[in-house]
Image: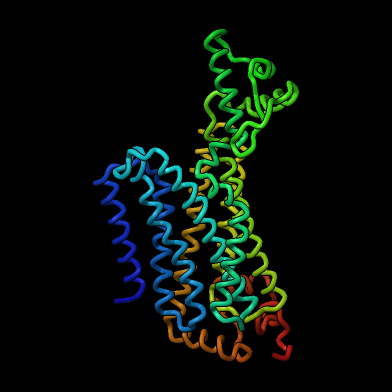
Amino acid sequence: MRLSKKVFYWWLAILSLFAATLLCLQHDRVSLPGFLSYSIQALLFVISVYIVRHEPIRKNKFIFVNFAVLFAFSFLDHLYPFVGKGGEFFSNQPFLRFFLGEYIFFGAYFLFIAFAIIYLTVDVLFRDFHTYQKYAASIGIALTFFGFYYAPYFDDPKYLHHTADVLDYKTLATSYDEWVNEVGQAPTPETLADITEMYSWKDGIKTGLLFPEEKLVRANALYAYLPDNWPVLVFKPLYSDALRMAVVSIGFILLFFGYLYMKDPPQGAYIEKIMFLLLVFCSLEALHLWTAMKEVEWSASSSIWTVGLNVSNVVLALLAGAFSMRLRFITSVKGEFYEQELAIRPSTITRWRDSLDNLVVEKFFNRKLILGRMFVSPNRRQ
């Protein structure tokens, strides 16, 4: 059986499992963009596993092991609607889904994206390092950023409900509702500040009363979220920290391409295209997070995620195409020979160019000048 058919059949089996569980088990609402997102990532998981199995160069296997672990989050993503309130399992645990989102989909997921990208970058920068050294460096870098941004969530699992913005909102919302019930119309920010006793906070504990000027500043800052847009305030810090991890990933991808431009080290076929698509994907994730942070209305914030998922799904589909081309290449005779020669005697061969590379060369470059590796003089001593 051809390898591409095996990949397709495995993916079809996974999709059938997804569909069967959705039909047979009680679950919360699943959006079509969300289903497509984790379905494409499941395909990427299957392709990554096959790349690991057939990769001719041992050190390259670990690159795709990391990606396989990353895309395995698609299975957790599918399980998410089945747990907690409205789900088949642990329906009596109202905060379970909240914790899963906090620690898994905004914590571990962005940590593993950063780790997979950092490892690939370290692999290019320090080719002579042992695998365990690359892992130690990559894990250390990723966990340093992650620990710096996410430490509050491990000190207090309900940290998002104990931020100063959320606590001030609760205080203002109580006064807001009381005023509406008595007067019949919404109070102004100035009125709300006058009738509300507000506090300064540290680690969710009151530390003192606010002066009238400070109360007015806080009332003006939070007034747009009243009366029922509190979820935006709750998730705003989480979006911000996930955005920072996405920026870390973008930074290392740019370091990867900067090093490739300056040194042009030997690199496996399609790795650069995979990194470029990851750059687009991480940039889109950062944009979606930043836009959701700036939005005031919860319904609009949710719509942003839906639109963002649709756009990201296109990039994920392209990424699946790049992974598929890598798998097809390394399982061909010429691909296996190329990868082995690249690992042993990189100076004796020129860079592999696929149809997209040839199109770019034909349209934007002078073929006579590009005899060897891109941007490198063909007369340079190896």
Q: Residue at x 41, y 56 (%)?
A: 74
Spot the residue most to the top: 183
Question: Please, is residue 322 above or below residue 203 in the view?
Answer: below
Q: Where is residue 31 in the image (x, y as percent from the top left)?
A: 40, 43
Question: Which image quadrant: the C terminus?
Answer: bottom right
Q: Which residue is drawn at 46% across and 83% down?
A: 56
Dividing the picture into quarters, in which one does residue 263 lie? bottom right
Question: Please, is residue 364 above or below residue 281 in the view?
Answer: below
Dividing the picture into quarters, in which one does residue 275 lie? bottom right
> From this viewpoint, is residue 307 visible?
no
Q: Which of 367 and 132 is in front in this view?
A: 132
Is residue 330 found left or right of 367 in the rendered image?
left
Q: Nearer the viewer, residue 85 or 247?
A: 85
Number of marks drawn: 0
Q: Residue at x 37, y 43 (%)?
A: 30
Question: Please, is residue 378 above or below residue 85 in the view?
Answer: below
Question: Which image quadrant: the N terminus?
Answer: bottom left
Is residue 239 found left or right of 34 in the rendered image?
right
Question: Please, is residue 194 above or below residue 33 in the view?
Answer: above
